[in-house]
Amino acid sequence: MRKHIGFKLMGLALIVIGFAACDTASQDVEPIISPENYPLATITSASGSTDIQEGDTLTYIIATNKMIDRAITFTPVVTGGTAGEADFIAAPAVLQPYSREAKLYIIATEDNIPEQSETVNVRISIESIAERYLVNPNTVLPSASLTIENKNDPTLLTIMFSWPTDDDMDIVTWSDTEDYPLTEWGAGGATSSNPEFDTAIWLSDPVGTYYVNIMDWDAGIDFDYTFTLGYPDGSVQVIEGTFTGTDKSGYTNDQWTAWGGSYDSYRILKVENDGTQFTVTVL
């Protein structure tokens, strides 16, 4: 009797397994939720260029092929480059619900400092993990290496003077033109700052020769200096040298009297202005 019951139980088990196998085989494997119908985002530069000049704005257009009811934030992530935080502004862009376009702006700040072109490497990202899964996985989030080009005042010569010591050094400019022979011209570079800046020599000034002089206030030291010149066309020239304050016999000393006294100033640079451009040489 027990033998017959055992066979019946085995037969019932086989029948149950057979039904389960048939049911499993008839089911197709599908994802619970497919992202294929999610909006596809396309990100492009409005200008098609990766170059930007100081004071200008580079615009990225973020467009989707369909709307959704959630906001998505696209963030410019800086991954490298030579530019500092003060050289540009890059803010996130929000694609609003039920919208198909947003704009992301990268602004190159204009600092009026003559400098070589700088770079910034940017990757546009969706930083929120939850928002990242709201777009089609085929969305390409681009990276770019941007070049920030220097911009100078187009009407004048921008002169930046720097040195590595804590001593107070200054620069002044002189005119030695036919209209103004050896005349004090500009003292914008005579402050307590390092670097010092002078913008006194304009293209509209009388044509002829101008000088850039160092005032070391009898510090009695030799020191290295750097002149960074910003020309009206945006180009930059860097001039490096050593001022021999321990022996100034090799310099032409022009006495600066515009402040009421008489102060030593030593010629370092010669500037030729022909009314359309400047040519600068070291004396």
Image: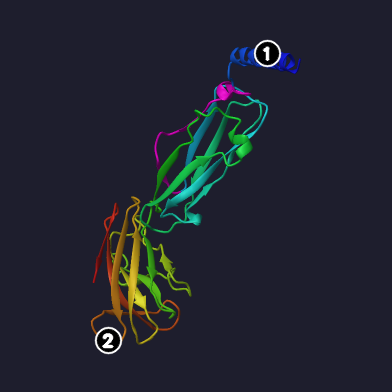
Residue 150 seen anywhere in this rendered image of the structure = no
The amino acid type found where label 1 is placed reads Gly
Whole-number angstrom distance, CA of label 1 to CA of label 2: 114 Å
Q: Quadrant of residue 132?
A: top right
Of 64 and 267, nearer the camera is: 64
With respect to residue 59, does 1 lie above or below?
A: above
Location of mark 1 (residue): 11
Of 88 and 139, nearer the camera is: 139
Q: Secondary structure at mark 1?
A: helix
Residue 228 image position (x, y, % from top left): 35, 63
The amino acid type found where label 2 is placed reads Asp
Horizontal relation, residue 33 to residue 178: left or right = right
Q: Residue at x 47, y 73 (%)?
A: 191
Magenta stretch: includes residue 52: yes
Decide: few, some or many residues near mark 1? Use Cα within 10 Å; few <14, some 14-19, many ≥20. Answer: few
With respect to residue 257, does 228 lie above or below?
A: above
Magenta residue span: 31-54
Q: Which mark is residue 247?
A: 2
Q: Quadrant of residue 280?
A: bottom left
Q: Residue at x 44, y 73 (%)?
A: 190
Q: Secondary structure at mark 2?
A: loop
Residue 20 image position (x, y, % from top left): 65, 16
